[in-house]
Amino acid sequence: MRYFSTRGDGPVNLDEALRKGIADDGGLFLPEKMPAFEITDFENAESIPEVAEVLLRPFFEGSALEDSLAGILAETFSFPMPLTDLAAAGREVGLLELYHGPTAAFKDVGAGFLAACLSRLESNTAAPLTILVATSGDTGGAVAAAFDSRPGMRVVVLFPEGRVSDRQAHQLCCWSDNVVSLKVQGSFDDCQALVKAAMADAELSAVHRFSSANSINIGRLLPQSTYYADASLRHHRRTGTKPGFIIPTGNLGNAFACIMAREMGLPIGPVILATNANRTIADYFETLEWLPRASLQTLASAMDVGDPSNMERLRKLVGEADVLRQQLGVLSVSDAEIEASIRQDFKEFGFATCPHTATASHTWRQLDEELAGAHDWILVGTAHPAKFETIVEPIIGQTVPLPPELEDILSRPAHAIAIKPDLTSLASVIGDT
Ligand SMILES: *Cc1c(COP(=O)(O)O)cnc(C)c1O
């Protein structure tokens, strides 16, 4: 499979696209052509890794990793992703639980896959590859966990000091020596600017061999399409119908993976994006004008994105707003609605949802009768509520028990180096580690 940038550069093979993350022309990599599948192609695929092997095989054609695919997938899909049946007020809905990985959020899937691929590609190189990641929370933890202790790979995590929760900070700072955690005296935007500046610095890049692991890397998207394929196939086998998915959305990586699976022929019905108060996508569908803006802070902080980068991929793959809005729904959910939804979920389902997942359950409750009844719906659960206990616990009036994976992380010692938000400070700390 050959990959081209959304802005025209290319072609490159998968290995190059994984290593680079972003194309030289600033665009995002997309496969030259989406493979097409029939439902019967998956007849013998029972488990998620088996589904992944059928689905992802064409993307690895011409890659040095082609023969390692089974091993990569076994590593990536090492935790369960159950599809749970729920009922509320006489209506049934499914919950796809994507939060049982090492850091209890769906980003573990993409980060794990990328780490499994890159560590194999880099196994014979003299200088380690340095993954730079600016994070406001979930991404950094998932990437650090995925690359922890891997030979030939180093991770530098940059987060804004004092602007992530204590539990989140701990998850960014409790790893082996190959993960360097930096608390930056500045904002998340300062962290991102610092990563960009470092990657653009020819001298530093030559020494450290920088790469990025944020959600624009195609290696984050490919494995995510697997759980949509698997869940939709299971549902289709059981009922003969195509389920609709409601997906908590920020940078559009998770939802893009679902749309990719539908484009490839998987039995997926309607797809609805649930965003927080950041209305860029909702306004685009309404006005047909793409107007990225600064992000607003909300309770669903991992979705605080004002300029969702994967929209560039979606427009290339599917079309502009007039076409897109016929194939996708979107609802922007306010903080007050998120709070109400967490309360309602707890009352009706009997367990807590995280603020991100609660945007999906709110959206489901808002569907009109006709749409709600026309399909079976699956809510996508993106994080465990215990990650956001300071928001969730006061709303439900109870503590949320820690899942074992988070308990394990929080019991480790944590360590971070404080730096100023400038390239000199960054260069000095990563130079001597
Ligand atoms: C990252 C994240 C999202 C948003 O996913 P995108 O791929 O950026 O749209 C939603 N929920 C949680 C918990 C996340 O960490």
Image (tube, rainbow, N blue to C red):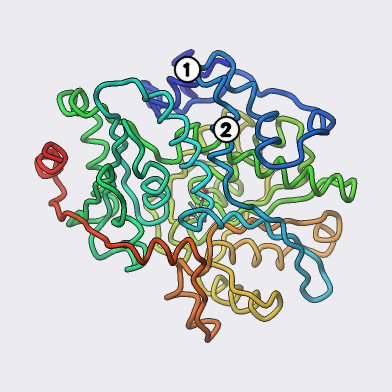
Q: Residue 360 versus residue 157: which sits nearer the camera?
A: 157
Q: Residue 155 versus residue 313: which sits nearer the camera?
A: 155
- Left/right of residue 351 with respect to residue 29 in the rendered view: right
Expressed as whole percent of the image width and height from the top left, the position of residue 410 reads 37, 65
Does mark 2's beta carbon lie closer than 8 Å to ligand 1?
no
Does mark 1's beta carbon lie closer than 8 Å to ligand 1?
no
Name the residue located 27 percent from the left edge and 29 percent from the top edge.
128
Amino acid identity at mark 1: Gly
Q: Residue 308 versus residue 429: which sits nearer the camera?
A: 429
Classify 52 as above or below 351. Answer: above
Residue 130: quarter of image: top left
Residue at the farthest right position:
240
Q: Earlier in the sequence, mark 1 or mark 2?
A: 1
Q: Which residue is mark 1?
A: 8
Kind of element beneath mark 1:
loop
Amino acid identity at mark 2: Arg
Res. 240 mark: none
Q: Quadrant of the N terminus?
A: top right
Name the residue located 22 percent from the left edge and 51 percent from the top edge.
182
Kind of element beneath mark 2:
helix
Q: Quadrant of the C terminus?
A: top left
Expressed as whole percent of the image width and height from the top left, the position of residue 25 reads 37, 21
Q: Residues within 10 Å of mark 1 (few under 14, many from 20)?
A: few
Name the residue located 20 percent from the left edge and 54 percent from the top edge.
184
Name the residue located 40 percent from the left edge and 49 percent from the top edge.
145
Q: How far is disc 1 from disc 2 in space, using C-alphas?
A: 14 Å
Expressed as whole percent of the image width and height from the top left, the position of residue 358 reads 59, 66
Residue at the farthest bottom position:
397
Q: Residues within 10 Å of mark 2 (few under 14, many from 20)?
A: some
Residue 370: quarter of image: bottom right
Res. 315 mark: 2
Classify 136 as above or below 52. Answer: below
